[in-house]
Image (cartoon, rainbow, N blue to C red):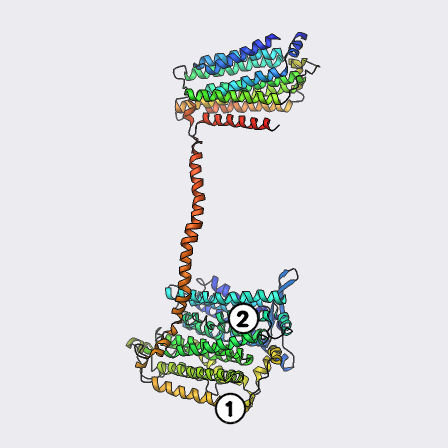
Amino acid sequence: MTIFYFVAFLSIFFALMTIFTKNPVHSVLYLVITFFTFTIHYILLNAQFLAVVNFIVYMGAIMVLFLFVLMLLNLNKDTEPMKSNLVKIMGTIAGMCLIATVLGALKVIETNNGFVTGNTDFGLVKNLGKILFDEFLLPFELSSILLLTAMVGAILLAKKDKKEA
Amino acid sequence: MIELIWLIPLLPLLGFLINGLGQNVLPKPLIGILGSGVVFASFLISCVLFGEVNTARSAGEAGTFTYQLFDWISVGSFNLSFSFLLDPLSAIMLLIVTGIGFLIHLYSYSYMEHDEGFGKFFSYLNLFIFFMLLLVLGSNYLIMFIGWEGVGLCSYLLIGFWYKNVDYSSAAKKAFVMNRIGDLGFLIAVFAIIATFGSLEFGEVLPAAAQLPMGDTALLLITLMLFIAATGKSAQLPLFTWLPDAMAGPTPVSALIHAATMVTAGIYMIARSNILFTLSPITMQIIAVVGLATALLAACIAITQNDIKKVLAYSTVSQLGYMFLGLGVGAFTGAFFHVLTHAFFKALLFLGAGSVIHAMSNEQDMRMMGGLKKKLPITYITMLIGTIAIAGIPPLSGFFSKDEILAYAFFASPVFWVLGFIGALFTAFYMFRLLALTFFGKFRGTEEQKHHVHESPWQMTLPLIVLAVFAAVGGCLNIPAALHGNSWLAQFLAPIFADSQTIAQPFHLEHTTEYILMAASTVGALAMAFYAINTYRRNVSVTDTSKGGVLYKLSYHKFYIDEIYQALVVKPLDAASRAFYKVVDRDGIDRLVHAVGDFFILSGRGIRQVQNGHVGFYIFMMVVGVIAIMVYGFLHV
Amino acid sequence: MDHIVQNIQGIPLNHYLIFCSIVFAIGVIGVLIRRNVIIIMMSIELMLNSVNLLLAAFSAYRGDASGQVFVFFVMALAAAEVAVGLAIVIMVYRNTKSVDLESLSKLRW
């Protein structure tokens, strides 16, 4: 039980580090750690498939992509553009207000904290796979087209112009 | 044969469309033949229909036919059909419009031959004939109003035919504006008729009106408004000033529109609704007085004018005044008879004047003419006939029609007769002055003009001859009983005026009285004729404008009526609109509008700062917005 | 497995909501206070993940697998988004020699 609060504390801490670290490379690394804590959260929720996917896709693929781009563009602390303090304070205040309103809203709306007992194993790969390939077959296939499109788009965008080449 | 009636207005309309659309494509002879031909065809059909009506009249019937084309307006209980009415009155008007119209088309073919707007001219003329026929044939006040407006439009177009001349354009505008005042009267009258009778059909309104008591107030309003309309269209006091200026148009136009047909529309309309007027004695009095005043005033002005067409224009106004006098004293037949004869001799005179102007290379000042008797024999003889006719010297047509009106005037009040008689003397004087200045004495133009003078081609002289014949013998149509005639026209038109005749006091004069009146006017006219010829055949210096007394100057400057209108109406209106422009429009409305505009410009300038292109700021605003929505949301849960 | 269920049962759903809101807000703050486009994209990922976790939590508490399927789709979407987004960043960098958001302020009156 306490493990949730501990991990949640870590998540928030590293998330904050992510956005407040000046060096972009460090930011990415903190984000990786944040995502790792999220993976733990998924395991705690008995969502093993999501935990695996999160681990592979986010920490593996997406974060590497970020890191790769940062390296490619050769960004570091010195080249990092920073906003003025006023803007930072304003942004922070706005974020705080957002939390305050969301929490306020949650307080107004009574959340049902009850836990529905029943099958808790649907987070397993086998069970989720059955649902995914049965009920959600069409969206699943469509998402593959989406990924293909994104891939083509990304290549097209990142490709150097022939004129420049 | 009544089925053919729709062809009568349709043919000129077709001519207008073809000539109007093809004015730059079609060759001139084709345009001329087409333009004249359609009118001639209408004339033939009109003749046939007139024959029908005449047969019916001879058989003792009313000779009234209606031919419905289609239902036009049908709102609730109010129904209005687009239909034509053929009765003795419209049958005669048909003949005048199409017959004289054809002659003038023929005349124009030669007169306008060298004008660049030849096709345009013929298309306008055809359009005019179309609208005039609609006016004449309409079986209700609304169709009549269409024609009424249409002829006003054509009048405007044709007065301003040489639109490049600014004076001519403004003359056209003047005619249009003056006519509008009258048209407003017509519209009000139409509404009043709907309100009173619930219908506009002549066939329903007139019998219904006959049931009303004498001096009904609704009738008073209707008739006054109709009379205002008539003063606009038929150039009576106080709206007559446009007609002399309308002489800016080509001479055939003056002959057709501003002498023979359009200007008589007011008389036609009043004759058509005679029962309304008979039942409204106040209006009748006003009509008689206004007609008489117009006749005298215009005759006074005509005496001193030097422009040949201006003299004829004022003469037209004066003769129209006589017709209104006739209407006012109840001589409906006489007034319409005068319309008929006037159409002949005034068209003749205008066409003759056109022939003279043509021969003199567009010289219109009579002081520059003279001695044309030898050079233009046909024109001279025909114009002489026309002049005798208009002067009222027997046995030509003008004598009969004018005398009938004067006889009725005498019956109504001897004062009317005396004034009318004086007007007739003036008429004889200025017409013979015109004749003397133009054809007698020595030639006073330039050498070049003298060399150029020639008789006009047959297209121009033929209409002159035909009209001269009619002007000479037209009087036979209605020879009064006093002269052992059978008053054919009065008999023919009897059903139209039957209701009025039963209501009004029966006209009765001793034959001896009539003889005395006739003799007086004949002797007077002859005396004035000889006086005028003697004065003007040699002595031209009389026309010198610098000399002469106060009366002469008054007359020469047209009694300053234009100037009076300018000072009394135009200037105050001008000043008022200027004041309104400054105070209401610029300081009021403009300020308000500008303030609204400025407000949005300024606020836009302020709000535009938000749109600064910084994505971060946009996101920030978005977050603020989301927070705001959430706050709003849970405040209202 | 049992102790996991017990573990979840011990934590009220509200705490997941609070936790995820905080992480989401941190993502928002990140977007607001940074000018580096890449960091902003990372903040967006942070927000996406917080929502993902919340979905998974709801799914577990409700015993309904749809939420987890949805998370799966969001992840696919996020992968696509990152790929295209980073490609755009590269393009922008190539043209402006900067990853500064302020250099992209052409969209204005």
Q: Amino acid at mark 1?
A: Tyr
| Quadrant into which the N terminus of chain B falls | bottom right
User: Residue B395: image x %, image y %?
Assistant: 48, 88
Taking the image as shown, residue B116 lies to the left or right of residue A10, namely left
Residue B567, compared with residue A131, is above or below; it is below
Q: Which mark is residue B224?
A: 2
Q: Amino acid at mark 2?
A: Leu
Q: Which mark is residue B515?
A: 1
User: Residue B197: image x %, image y %?
Assistant: 63, 67
Residue B92, compared with residue C35, is above or below; it is below
Give the structural element (helix, strand or loop) at label 2.
Answer: helix
Circle 1 chain: B
Taking the image as shown, residue B503 lies to the left or right of residue B615, namely right
Observer-nearest of B284 and A152: B284
Residue B386, compared with residue A10, is above or below; it is below
Circle 2 chain: B
